[in-house]
Amino acid sequence: MIRKATLNDIGSILQLTNACAKHMIANNIHQWNEHYPSENAFLNDVAQSELYVMEIGNTIIGCVVISTLMDEEYIPIEWLTKNEKNIYIHRLAVHPNHQGKGYAQQFMDFAETFAKTNDYESVRLDTFSQNKRNQKFYEQRGYKRLGDIYFPKQSEYPFYCYELVF
């Protein structure tokens, strides 16, 4: 089940994203660290009503942010659509114990359906340049790679921006 997150979910979400960060680092993908994703980011996501979780039983196994706000890092990118009716995906995570079972696909189906249902023109996101698995995941869904941005607190390597137009 995918539902909106509440403040009571923050502890479980942080455990989940910490497990994901450790899993990525163990696979030499230095995408998440002590700076990101932060508790403050998730608190803000809940306040904005943009954070969703996936539960199996009573256990949160994944999360995703579906936002209408464009981060300033995205401004230089030459997007395929105007910066008016777009959804931005952030902090998509599935606990390592549950990866490879299609849950990330379900999250993206949910986000894309949300965007289409609410008449958005596209879905935009970024993924780490050193995370080849994520790049393949989004490209197989039809996302087009458009440009690079940097998050110096996360990595010296770029993050690739992607967009899916409906």
Image (tube, rainbow, N blue to C red):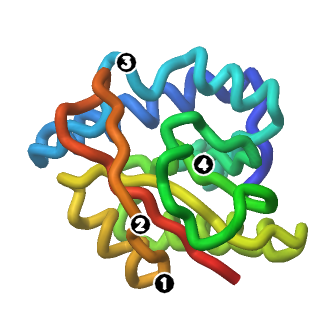
Q: Determine the residue located farthest toward the right in the rendered image.
A: 118
Residue tagged by mark 3?
Answer: 35
Amino acid type for the residue under numbered disc 4? Val
Residue 116 in the image: state x and y as whole percent: 81, 76
The residue at 33%/63% (across/down) is 134
Q: Secondary structure at mark 2?
A: strand
Q: Quadrant of the C terminus?
A: bottom right
Amino acid bearing label 3: His
Q: Residues within 10 Å of mark 3 (few under 14, many from 20)?
A: few
Work out whether mark 4 precedes mark 1 in sequence or the reverse, and give the earlier one.
4
Q: Could you tell me which residue is drawn at 48 percent across and 81 percent down?
A: 141
Residue located beneath label 1 in the image: 142
Asked if residue 143 can be seen in this view, the reply is yes
- Describe residue 38's horizontal placement relative to residue 139 as left or right: right
The CA span between labels 4 and 2 is 22 Å
Pair 3/2: label in front: 2
Q: Which residue is mark 4?
A: 64
- Disc 2 vs disc 1: which is toward the camera? 2
Work out whether 14 lies above or below 54: above
Q: Secondary structure at mark 4?
A: strand
| Tag 2: amino acid | Leu
